[in-house]
Amino acid sequence: MAPKKSKKSKQEDSMIDFVEEEVSGDVDEEGFEEAEDIVVDSEEDEPPKKKKKVIKKEVKQELELTDEKLQELLEKYEASKSTATKTKDDFKHLPKSQRGKALKRALRKDKRARQEERTKIRDELGESAPQKEVPKTIESMREYDATMVDEQDDEVEHDEANDEFAPYFNRETTPKVMITMTPKAKITTFKFCFELQKCIPNSEMFTRKNVLLKTIIEQAKEREFTDLLVVHEDRKKPNGIIFCHLPEGPTAYFKINSLTFTQDLKKFGESTAHFPEVILNNFNTRLGHNIARMLACLFPHDPKFTGRRVVTFHNQRDYIFFRHHRYEFKKEGTKAALLELGPRFTLRLKWLQKGTFDAKWGEFEWVLKRHEMETSRRRFFL
Amino acid sequence: MDCYIGATTGTFKGALLKDNTFENLNKVSTLDPKSDEITSMIWNDDQQTEILIARMNRDLQLYDIEQNEQVSILTVTGGTGPIKGLHKLDEKIVTCVESGELQVWNDKSETVSEWKCGPGVAVMRGSDEKPEIVTGGMKNLLKTWNLETGQQVWSAKNVPPDMLGLEIPIMITDARFIPGENTILEATKLHEMRVYDPRAQRRPVKKIVFMENPIMCTSLTNKTNQILAANSIGEMGLFDLRSKVHPMCKFKGQAGSIRSISGHPTMPLAASVGIDRFLRVHDLQTRKMVHKVRQLSKDLFFSIFEFQIYCKARLNRVLLRNELSILNDRKSAAKKEIDEDEAEYGKMTEDGYRSEGDDDDVIEEDDVWDVMEPVAKKKKMSHDDVEIVEEVENQKAKRKRKAVVVPEEEIKEEVESDDDVEEIQKPSPKKTLKSGKKVLLKKKARKV
Amino acid sequence: MQCDDVTWNILHKGQCSYKAWSKPKMFCRNEMNLTGLCNRASCPLANSQYATVREENGVCYLYAKVVERSHYPRRLWEKTKLSKDMNKALEQISDQLIHWSEYVRHKCKARLIRIHQYLIRMRKMAVRGNQKKLIPIGRKVERREKRREEKALVAAKLDHAIEKELLARLKQGTYGDVYNFRQEAFEQMLENTEKELEIEQEVEQDDPDTGETQFVADFDSSDDEEDMEDGGDGHWSPEETDSENEETWQQQEEESDGDDDGEDGGEPMEVDEPPKKKSKKEVKKKTVKKAADGKKKKLKKRAHVEIEYEEEVEPRQRVKA
């Protein structure tokens, strides 16, 4: 949603909101219809209560055989898809500050009405109903990316079997993570590091003490750490994280966004010492695969399922959402209830460098170049 | 195959630009990147039928393009580290490993001579003109060696210390002779390129600064004074060595470090590969990734569709062939154009397409233009080339159609006004070109 | 002719473009100023006999004013290169300024020392090599990213995605013997309930039983249950019973739904989930889910099923307490 603006532009604001509403509304509609569909299915299975309706339907289906009727219904269906007629001019009688809201409300009402109309027509049409439209989301309209990883690709498999993370996935190394921060870090950064330490088993936290990162890396290698996390801060808040896989790299830099500490969550539980499961969602491109493998390397191999802890890295539109939950299967394994445990934050990849940290002389595998790359809202890299 | 690519996983790939595809020329599953990574690649002969490939385990292999076969020739011994440079000089192969052992092998895989050129070698490259090679690397200044005697011919001197009196680190990443200029170009990690003139002095005669990241590789282009350089975050620039210090243009598209560029010797094209796993072909004239039909020079077209090939592995080396499928097989592209413009241009047959050996023609043409320049200068119009092409085209059209000869003024008008024609006209054979030249010369003579 | 007092009076009391006002003292912006202060002794304009030390590209120079050339401002200053060795440079200064005022000589030396100190520091920093590069952050870019992130978060439907993945893992059998309830058992149970539905009262009696035996036994049978309790004892509070948990979960779902659409409440999750490429798993999941959903809805129509779950709570509570 658009950020709140000054009062003057509020009307404009609401207009913007309205447009967005429209877009997302389309999506919902389909969902709504689908829901309706399912209900109908189950009715057909056993029609105890709403027998009347089903009978009606049958009658209508007989009627439908006439082409004209069908055509008419279809036209009606199409017509109901068109956008609403109400504009902000219809609300001139209201004070300016209320017009936007009123318009929104009216449009919503209108849309709902049309939706219902359409579902009715669908019911009438029965099987000959037009196909439901696939919702147009940014994800489904994503620009083609040649690097999408195919499961059966031998070459990618070979490449991955020989990359820097292979020892972990071959179970030759067990993860041991070092967490540190910028020199002279402030309290929030420390707090964040503590939270990270809680999430990541087998991790140790060190204060930086103005030591060079390269020396830290050397020492960490000696002590057989497999990963190094360096939290950066800006204006006393963590704003970035350098993630260096040891001993051979690669190094990634993520920006940290919208960090919420455990204490600030509405409802939170306390983390346990069990090894968590890891969920890595939506990492589809070659780069995304690499990042996912890198993130997976932070956590030990065999999660303790009895701990029911789960750490999620969910990638959506190049934003990697970190969540930490305890789950519980409900209703005999058809539902899973989640209780949030750890902090939540969002990561955004800025660069990926080959080898251990060397921002000056190192070779970069991928760099986010804003002007060259962010050419479209539907172009994603992970 | 238009491009041959060596990857860090050890795969050897051939890319076909026309189809925008690549093919693995060896078996992927058997490779071990720790020993099979391709560290260096050169053409074995001038005809470009064989490629010499150096692997991480210092095996030297010969790849035959026609037979599609790889044969191991020899294994380099002595010293440590991978092979950093290869050079071929009449049946002799020169290899150089990272620790500085430089060896010359004859065609029976025996060492002819061997000497050291200092540790930390990052690059070794030979000259096409004389039996010399240049070496350089980390903390290893640029040196040229005579291959026949094994003697050091010239060595560079480090640039003076900076304002704080600190020594400038020597971090050479790439070096090469500039043909025809007798100069040497050096690329460093200090985001600086230096041009040395061995005849004049030991310190660089020119420094070119490019962006802010280490320059990883350089390449020659079809023009003698222009070079390409690329850095570790995927910025590639075209430079003119004569005058300009800043890049003539920057190329877009790469996401990560570029390991190798290969410029086409006659066409304004350059292929680049890097660890972002893409092969990209850029057009040096339009400064874009070439992806559509374009008239390349005078009377040549080429057609390319999206020139960005995802090769699935980190790529180390690239070699661009002289004969490109997109250049030779222009029929389809040109045909398309013709289909569009058939009505306008009447019956144009396919006689006009060039067969193989285009490139020679192009060179000849270049020579022609060199000769002609002084004449052209007298004229007011700046776009001599365009004019000549038009002349040629018109001539050809006239001949083909057996039309009535158009008075010369009319032709000129057409030339000056009709720029679009240039784009659409199809290539003309060499013969007509020559005749066109004659016409022009005659015309100019008359004017004088 | 130079007349220092007149110049000073004008500059001091009147206008001087080099004056820089600040709280404790007045400073001078003239680059030739020896001390940086604005006073009579160190004013480069109002002193005929004046010298200073300046650093240019790492090299120190002694600038001495030659007042005889004041009609040629270009040649007004005499520039002497100072040695890189500080002691030698100090000697040089005392030689050059041998007959000059003590103040100028002293201040020149002090300035030289200061310059050398900062050069040393620069060198140290350069050698250490941990210079930071400051990159400006575009406020608009930041704002845009933030907004996009919010939208991405909505589109992600994190809770759904996580739950889905977990359930998929459960179906796949990742958890092995930790949980005993299986789809077959579940379905069998459903069949049982259907059969017994005809007699409503029986259902009420029977169902809790089945639920109890299955659920509780499974959880207790797992060896690490105790372990689990130890770890999460204080936090998984006893009041936080299963039913409550469930409620929160439902709330969460509702909340997220509300975020997503703002209009529709009970939409099934498989409709507009983000397109994923895990086709195989997904299809399986979907089908299974759909079936489950259908059944759930079937159940919902009969009021008793809910009771079944409610009653299930009690035995667990007992166990925990």
Image (spheres, coloured by chain):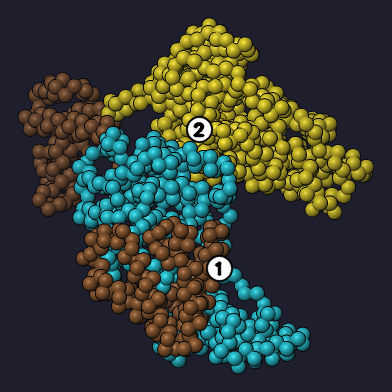
In this view, the residue in front, B144 or A328, is: A328
Numbered tag placed on residue A36 in the rendering: none
Gap between marks 1 and 2, in whole Å? 42 Å
Residue A327, relative to residue B405: is it above or below?
below
Residue C238, relative to residue A162: is it above or below?
below
Task: Please identify which colour was used for chain A in the image.
Answer: cyan
Q: Which chain is yellow?
A: B
x then y, percent, for residue B367: 71, 26
Q: Nearer the viewer, mark 1 or mark 2?
A: 1
x then y, percent, for residue A183: 23, 45
Task: Please identify which colour was used for chain C in the image.
Answer: brown
- Residue, disc 1: C287
Which quadrant holds residue C70?
Answer: top left
Q: Residue at x 51, y 47 (%)?
A: A286
Give the quadrant of the N terminus of chain A. bottom left
Numbered tag placed on residue B33 in the rendering: 2
At label 1, the amino acid type is Thr
Circle 2 SS class = helix
Q: Residue at x 32, y 24 (%)?
A: B167
At label 2, the amino acid type is Pro
x then y, percent, for residue C39: 11, 43
Task: Check chain identity for marks 1 and 2: say if they share one.
Answer: no
In this view, the residue in front, A292 or B318, is: A292
Q: Is residue C172 visible?
A: yes
In this view, the residue in front, C161 or A72, is: C161
The crowd level at tag 1 (other Cα within 10 Å; few <14, some 14-19, many 20+) is few
Q: Chain of mark 2?
A: B
Q: Residue at x 49, y 40 (%)?
A: A161
Which quadrant holds residue B354?
Answer: top right
Q: Residue furthest top?
A: B149
Q: Residue furthest bottom?
A: A52
